[in-house]
Amino acid sequence: MKKIFITCDMEGVSGCTGWDSVIKGKEDYFRLRQQMTRELVSVVNSINDSFSDCEVVIKDAHDGGDNILIGELPENCKLITGWYGGPMSMIQGLDETFDCSIFLGYHSGAGVANYPISHTYNSRRFARMALNGRVCSEFTLNYLKSWDLKVPVVLVSGDADLCEHINDFDPRIQTVAATRGYGASITSKAPARVNKELFEAFKKVRLEDFKDFNLDYRSYELEIEYSKQTDAIKASFYPGTKRQGEKKLSFSGKSIDEILVALLFI
């Protein structure tokens, strides 16, 4: 039996119009919640069409972790909601037993200008984040941990800038660009088209193409620029951090786990 893990965010879902559409209680939120669920179901339907026996574990990884409409999911799915408070965060539930992982509705990281709601974890706290000299997004951190568990990331959907970055970062990954940002504007593909592209994208996945991890990271250098100086000062008391300026600090780790744990506190 195949086991597939899916982590779902919302800012990279088709029809996202900005912050107001991804915040619970806002007028446009329920519409985007529905589309988030439909994009997920399109991928699960493709998985089930490809494998006769498969378990799909899904982490709702947006905001409160309670956005996906569970009543719409196929019966071979399990849904993880809420937050347990540990470093796995958006990929809680992922372990070595999975055949692959999929990231849906993801978005560009803090410091990327084109997508108006680009951020990494906390949009108000982090102005920019880099790992080993490259812009660090939520995709980057979760991708590295997934591979650390020997579970390849095979499909990602989100905004066009993120997808273009991924095509350079690991061209084996199938990507579906649902949105594209420019200034304060967002252009979305029609939801029906994105649903279809997601279904077809998983069909192109060949697990045998993902035998090797192609990044040889023996150490990790995390650089963070904070929005507020006071946040940088507070974080600088975490063991191993180094101040790099009024609002900047760095942290070195020997493993992705050390980076993920540090991010819980800095």
Image (spheres, rainbow, N blue to C red):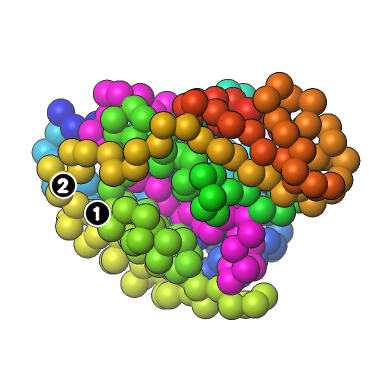
Observer-nearest residue: 36 or 148? 148
Q: Relative to 123, does residue 51 appear above or below in the rendering?
A: above
* 125 with respect to 68 (left or right): right
Q: Are marks 1 and 2 in contact (CB under 8 Å)?
A: yes
Question: Is 152 contained in the magenta span?
Answer: no
Question: Is 101 contained in the magenta span?
Answer: yes
Q: What stretch is highlighted in magenta?
A: 93-119
* Count of numbered circles in the view: 2
Observer-nearest residue: 144 or 22? 144
Cα separation between marks 1 and 2 = 7 Å
**What main secondary structure does the magenta stretch of the protein show?**
loop
| Residue bearing the label numbered 2 | 209
Instruction: Determine the image quadrant of residue 262.
Output: top right
Q: Residue 98 location, x and y as percent?
A: 27, 29
For badge 1, the amino acid type reads Arg
Q: Which of marks 1 and 2 is nearer the N terminus?
A: 1
Q: Identify the disc placed on residue 172.
A: 1
Q: Which residue is drawn at 79% across and 26% down?
A: 237
Q: Which residue is drawn at 32% across and 53% down?
A: 170
